[in-house]
Amino acid sequence: MARFSLVLILCFPALALAQHEEEVAPRLAEYWARKTVAVQPKLHPKARALELVVHAGVIPNDAFLIYIPVGARVAYHLTERWALEASFGYHLQADTGLRDYLEENDAQLRARLRDRQQLSASAGLCWSPVYGKAALGAGTIVHFDGYLLAGGGIVRTEEEEAIELDAATRPDFHLGLGLRVFFGSRWLVRLEYRQHLFLRPTDGSGGGGGVGFPSEISVGVGVLLGGR
């Protein structure tokens, strides 16, 4: 009888533990199989949203002119990372003074002066691999979105009678990168750099031509409409 009691005493904890494991096992499996989610969702979802932006900038790397492109961009966000974008810009111009100097001294102006950009239009693809936030002082958090872009379009150049250069529409390609900084749930500011490449027109004597490399730096203000 004493031996039977000892066996019951030794077996009871094992039986209780086995029963406990049977009850806890499904919960453990559910716990380890669960997916990890973000503690805080994005405050600025872009998927299926329309982005409207007005922008102004500068193209400083032309020897004769400083261009100030002003215009608008429209982007449709296919997903949080990918978007299709169309852009238009009108190029205001300011002479650097080099043109007047060459005209006064007749320093081979025909060979050096090539074109004057008037406006541009393009379409492209935008990829946003980076989304994050930064703390600015106590209680101020700024959300941002980094992106890369590539595309192509046209550049319209003006007529230059002095070198027999007709107005022309030339193909243009660009690569770029930028940063969206969000304010509220819809408003944003875009800081952007675009490196353009376009085929220059030739003048009446067959001079000019070649490839132009305008570098555009711009700032835009925009809004997100729709989206999920």
Image (cartoon, rainbow, N blue to C red):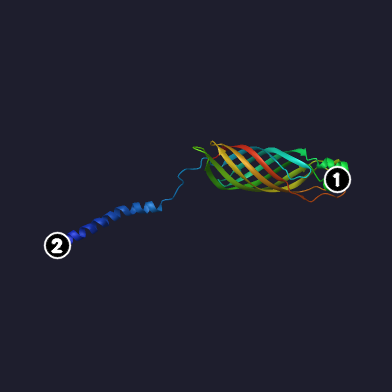
The answer to which quarter of the image holds residue 225 is top right
Res. 145 in view: yes
Mark 1 neighbour density, 10 Å: few (under 14) some (14–19) many (20 or more): some
Q: Which mark is residue 209?
A: none
- Residue 90 falls left or right of residue 113: left
Residue at the bottom extreme?
A: 3
Relative depth, front residue between 56 and 38: 56
Q: Is residue 185 left or right of residue 153?
A: left
Q: Nearer the viewer, residue 170 or 93?
A: 93
Residue 178 in the image, given as x and y percentages of width and height? 62, 45
* x and y percentages locating residue 127 in the rendered image: 60, 48
Q: Which quarter shows the N terminus?
A: bottom left
Q: How many other residues sit within 10 Å of disc 2, few (<14), some (14-19) or many (≥20)?
A: few
Query: Mark 1, mark 2: which one is toward the viewer?
Result: 1
Q: Position of residue 144 (x, y in %)?
A: 56, 43
Q: Residue under circle 1?
A: 109
Q: Residue at x 53, y 43 (%)?
A: 133
The image shows residue 4, relative to residue 226, as above or below, that is: below
Report if residue 117 is visible in the image: no
Mark 2 residue type: Phe
Residue drawn at 16 percent across, 61 percent down: 6
What residue type is disc 1 on?
A: Leu
> How far across and how far down the image is residue 3, in percent?
14, 63
Q: Which residue is mark 2?
A: 4
- Counting residues from the N terminus, which is met first, the one under dot 1 or under dot 2? 2
Judged from the image, the secondary structure of the residue bearing numbered disc 2 is: helix
In which quarter of the view is residue 167 placed? top right
